[in-house]
Amino acid sequence: MSSSHTGEHSEHPEVEGPGYATPQAAIEESERETVAYVIGLYTGTDIDAPDFLAVVDVDPESSTYGEITHRIEMPTKGDELHHFGWNACSSSCHMEGLERRYLVVPGNRSSRITVIDTKERDHPEIVRVIEPEEVHELDLSAPHTVHCPAGGGVMVSMLGDADGELPGGFLELNEDLEIEGRWDLPGEIEMNYDFWYQPRHNVMISSEWAAPETYQPGFDMEDVEAGKYGHRLHFWNWGDKTVEQTVDLGEEGLVPLEVRFLHSPEATHGYVNAALSSNIFHFFEDREARSASEGASGDEPRADGRWRAEKVIDFEGRDLEGWDMPVPALPTDILISMDDRYLFGANWLHGEVWMYDISDPANPRHADSISIGGYFGDVREVKGRELAAGPQMVQLSLDGERLYWTTSLYSTWDDQFFPEEKERGSVMLKADVDPRRGTLTLDEDFLVDFGTLPEGPARAHEIRWPDGDCTSDVWQ
């Protein structure tokens, strides 16, 4: 398989670009992952070194299995690398000559964006740096989610204005990965965080965290009480780049983070994790409302309420000595398997990775979980390595048989809730998944230890595969 997976050897010869023709093709045609790209962080530690992108060997047949084999250091210090993504995905598979080759790696704290060429998978290299001043010229800051729209180029959600205040917005890069401009009109939304789009339904959904000046110094409950954290989902007209509907999730939907549509391009169902409320919401299209809206004449207003959101999973808080309130689970990341069968996620504070059967999207059924790390996890060490924080960022193999996770959320938040991780560093762990039985089994022989690097312990965050993954590919 080539690094761009152009479809040359595919059963779907119509695929000319960088992806798979369908989600099912991604399952059937993909080879087992052998390389993982993982964010490594020194920002917020006592170590005077830049953040980096780690190349991790995940090939069980390799002599360096479970090791960091190469690191790409950022050109400056203090970026706080967070989420990152590809220049192209399966939504672009109709675009001849486009390769899934470049990683767009934003610094959430610095607003610097670094472009990394992965032509040599084991030894990627930096090819472009977009400096913060270029981003600030558009009155934007704090880049977060990277997606590649179907028409080429890259879109990045931005969480603040040039001063780290509200409102946020969206930055657009062209196919050469240079700044094109703003995607949205300033002021269309206030808070921003993650987003996902479904081209066939002309919809994009974005979620909310807070202004950079609020979350970057660390978590303060007074900010929640003052209404400085988000609780809404925004449903955009993808073509018009305007918000058509906003759904307020209320007190049970505080801090809605990761937005995940089902992978089928026909689907109008998805999920979002309300981290602070420790709930999972199912969002879906109300077909009757859509029909009423499409049937309205030009003189009539569009019918409101095409989209709905309902709480479908609730994680109860747990009592802990020293806390004056039950400890929330804090589900900080979720993803959906390529076959749209399972929803996976991580409860960072409780120390749990879990999977739910979502064959009936409105009624998820708990399938299995692993209690590990965090404040309450049963498993406290792997391969003799003592664990500190709980599972945080998750990534699934394309065939749905291996779930990986790392343990750092954000430097200042890490210091508040798991300060010992600064001294020990993060880990990357793995569970084997049996999709037929719906089970998770911890792989006690797999451990990537970010605490043993020559410069000192580092934190680990998001994970990407060279051939695309369950949290970046979109189909049209």
Image (cartoon, rainbow, N blue to C red):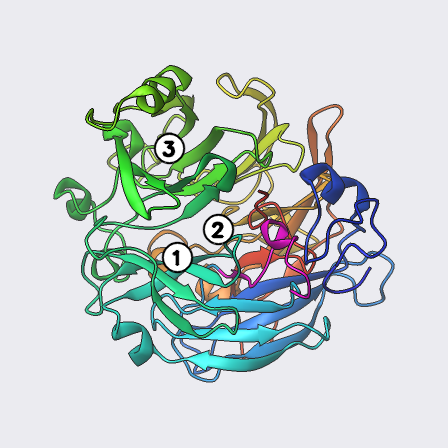
Q: Give the CA distance from mark 2 to mark 1.
A: 8 Å
Label 3: few (<14), some or many (≥20) within 10 Å?
Answer: many
| Region rendered in magenta | 84-98
First reached walking from the N terminus: tag 3 or tag 2: 3
Counting every numbered tag in the picture gives 3
- Identity of the amino acid at label 1? Asp
Pointer 2 with pointer 1, Cβ within 8 A: yes
Q: Quadrant of residue 186?
A: bottom left
Tell me which residue sits at (68%, 53%) in the image. 19
Residue corresponding to mark 2: 389
Quadrant where the N terminus sits is bottom right
Among the 4 quarters of the image, the one containing residue 48: bottom left
The mark that comes first in sequence, 2 or 1, is 2
The percent position of residue 9, horizontal first and vertical second, equals 86, 54
| Vertical comparison of 277 with 445: above or below | above
Q: Is residue 454 visible?
A: no
Furthest-left residue in view?
226
Q: Which mark is residue 414?
A: 1
**Residue 300 image position (x, y, % from top left):** 20, 24
| Residue at left offset 63%, top offset 64% | 37
Query: Toward which corner of the image does residue 341 lie, by quadrant?
Result: top right
Indicate whether residue 65 is drawn in magenta: no
For residue 273, above or below residue 130? above
Q: Look at the numbered discs 3 and 1 and tell me whether their residues touch, using CB distance below 8 Å.
A: no
Which numbered disc, 3 or 1, marks the residue that appears first in the sequence?
A: 3
- Mark 3 = which residue? 278
